[in-house]
Image (spheres, rainbow, N blue to C red):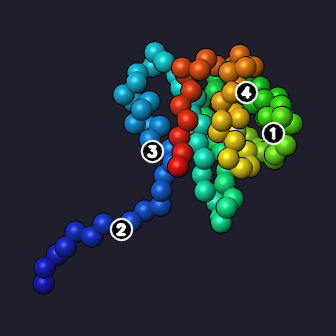
Amino acid sequence: MVDFEVQIPTAFDPFSEAELTDATAGSTKEYVHIRVQQRNGRKSLTTVQGLQKELSYDKILKDLKKAFCCNGTVVNDKELGKVIQLQGDQRKNVSTFIVQAGIVKKDQIKVHGF
């Protein structure tokens, strides 16, 4: 009998790209990653990761929800820390909002997605 190495396909990991860029970028420049994840059908989810820990995530989430008329939540992840999740594809809206609010600079934002 011949042994074959079988690779089982795994689910798409949207955060794997961030781990690679964070490791290669070094600790001098921190990025805010804005991603879109496909749910079911036409539904999608926007995640914001990498904001400073000193910021009030609940206040930022409240302002984002009010500005874009969508629902959202703050999720605590073991590896990534706090991640903001919003309903719908809000990548452009979130990036312009956090720049105008003065939370981060435009060159510190990385937008990922389709």
Distance in Å between CA atoms under marks 4 and 3: 25 Å
Q: In this view, does 109 lie above or below 7?
A: above
- Amino acid type of disc 4? Phe
Residue drawn at (45%, 19%) of the image: 27
Disc 3: which residue? 16
In this rendering, which labeled residue sits more in front, label 2 or label 1?
Answer: 1
- Dot 2 or dot 1: first in sequence order is 2
User: Which mark, by number, is residue 8?
Assistant: 2
At label 2, counting other C-alpha atoms closer than 10 Å, the crowd grade (few under 14, some 14-19, many 20 or more) is few
**Circles 4, 1 touching at the beta carbon (< 8 Å):** yes
Disc 4: which residue? 97
Residue 12 rendering spot, x and y as whole percentages = 47, 56
Quarter of the image with the N terminus is bottom left
Distance in Å between CA atoms under marks 2 and 1: 40 Å
- Amino acid type of disc 3? Ser
Disc 1: which residue? 68
For this view, does 14 lie left or right of residue 99? left
For this view, does 75 lie left or right of residue 3? right
At label 4, counting other C-alpha atoms closer than 10 Å, the crowd grade (few under 14, some 14-19, many 20 or more) is some
- Dot 4 or dot 1: first in sequence order is 1
Nearest the viewer among 92 and 74 is 92
